[in-house]
Image: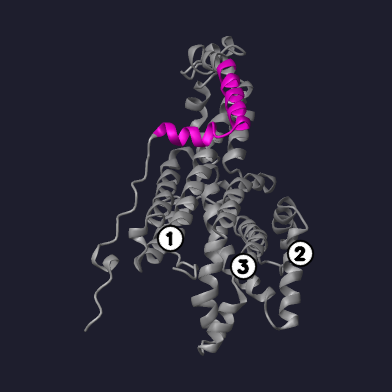
């Protein structure tokens, strides 16, 4: 007689319980879960209630919104002068780029932001995306530099503002990641010479600030070049930022590599997988998934560190703001409003990178295979 089926095999699995998305339970868990959390929340609410009326008067009620220098001077100390953004906004956003050609810088910025947006959509992770990046970067470089198709030539030392900030961030991150991956693998190599060279590079670069690296790339590196050979200052700065970022990212990746259990590597060797196939298919996917927060953190830090290129006369967003206001005594007293404007741009960029990193983490957690022996 055949064995009767088990009763639990006849019933379909029960659906998971619904996820509650009510605002109050989430707010209570985040802000009022304990006595200390409740006190901190109440203290912050009291501080906000005390500061909100004054900020409202300064930033909205008594503020000057039109680009009128006399009205801003009259309201100085009482209300904000947002007219400085209307008056100097284009100089802040595009720096020393020729005023009548700034549409080219705006178009190049839109192309770069569009490529970043496409890269953040999983539906666009297709074989055509690298080609889109190559074409987009080529079109952006053509728009910025010109010299073809009837566009006037604009040297790179006149690039500035938001386009330069985004360009330095994207290119340095994209160039640093392969180098960082190679250095991280080299520090775990079985060859002592390779380990020593990679460790020396990391320790030397991490032992100096980025300002020193930019200074050496801009002023000292040309002294060692052959006579008559000159490399564009933007390329030298980009190379310095790439080498600097790669040293830090390499250590982040190395931490992820060390987090992969040794048993998985031994199991791959037992199955006949070679060293490189083991790294590409088993070790690196797990290592990179484990260090997503650290990688996003360094991208955000590099985005903000682009403000240091001002020391080599490349006026990115922060430098363009100082250049725009310092050259005009009428608007110079209203730097606070200008700083708040560029702070909002930095905040938007950093928040977008942070939220995208959090989305990647959640997706990796959903797709990661379980390691529970009872599963």
Question: Magenta stretch mostly in which secondary structure?
Answer: helix
On residue 259, the disc is 3
For label 2, the crowd category at 10 Å Cα-Cα, with few meaning under 14, some 14 to 19 and many 20 or more, is: few
Residue beneath label 2, please? 203
> Would you place residue 319 above or below residue 220 in this image?
above
The residue that appears at 49% across and 50% down in the rendered structure is: 358
Q: Which of 219 and 75 is in front in this view?
A: 75
Pick whichever of labels 2 and 1 is earlier in the sequence. Answer: 1
- Secondary-structure class at tag 3: helix
Nearer to us of marks 3 and 2 is 3
On residue 138, the disc is 1
Residue 176 position, x and y percent, is: 59, 63
Residue farthest front in this picture: 1
Question: Quadrant location of the N terminus?
Answer: bottom left
Q: How many marks?
A: 3
Residue 247 position, x and y percent, is: 67, 63
Mark 2 and mark 1: Cα distance apart in space? 35 Å
Q: Quadrant of residue 69?
A: top right
- Secondary-structure class at tag 1: helix
């Amino acid at each position: 007689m055949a064995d009767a089926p088990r009763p639990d095999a006849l019933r379909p699995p029960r659906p998971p319980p619904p996820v509650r998305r009510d605002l109050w339970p989430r707010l209570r868990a985040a802000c009022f879960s304990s006595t200390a959390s409740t006190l901190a929340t109440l203290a912050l609410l009291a501080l906000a209630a005390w500061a909100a009326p004054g900020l409202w008067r300064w930033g909205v009620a008594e503020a000057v919104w039109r680009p009128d220098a006399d009205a801003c001077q009259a309201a100085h100390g009482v209300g904000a002068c947002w007219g400085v953004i209307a008056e100097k906004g284009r100089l802040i956003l595009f720096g020393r780029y020729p005023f009548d050609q700034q549409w080219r810088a705006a178009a190049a910025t839109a192309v770069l932001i569009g490529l970043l947006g496409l890269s953040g959509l999983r539906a666009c992770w297709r074989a055509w995306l690298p080609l889109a990046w190559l074409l987009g970067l080529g079109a952006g470089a053509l728009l910025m530099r010109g010299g073809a198709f009837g566009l006037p030539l604009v040297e790179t030392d006149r690039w500035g503002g938001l386009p330069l900030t985004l360009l330095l961030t994207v290119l340095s991150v994209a160039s640093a990641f392969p180098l960082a991956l190679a250095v991280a693998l080299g520090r775990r190599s079985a060859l002592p010479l390779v380990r020593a060279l990679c460790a020396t590079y990391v320790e030397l670069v991490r032992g100096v600030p980025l300002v020193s690296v930019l200074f050496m790339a801009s002023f000292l590196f040309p002294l060692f070049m052959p006579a008559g050979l000159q490399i564009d200052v933007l390329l030298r700065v980009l190379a310095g930022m790439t080498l600097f970022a790669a040293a830090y990212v390499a250590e982040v990746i190395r931490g992820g590599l060390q987090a992969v259990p040794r048993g998985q590597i031994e199991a791959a060797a037992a199955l006949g997988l070679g060293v490189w196939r083991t790294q590409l298919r088993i070790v690196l996917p797990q290592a990179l998934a484990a260090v997503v927060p650290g990688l996003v953190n360094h991208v955000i830090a590099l985005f903000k560190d682009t403000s240091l290129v001002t020391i080599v006369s490349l006026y990115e967003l922060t430098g363009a703001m100082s250049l725009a206001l310092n050259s005009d005594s009428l608007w110079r007293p209203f730097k606070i409003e200008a700083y708040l404007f560029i702070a909002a741009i930095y905040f938007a960029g950093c928040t977008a990178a942070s939220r995208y990193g959090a989305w990647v983490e959640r997706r990796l957690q959903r797709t990661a295979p379980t390691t529970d022996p009872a599963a």
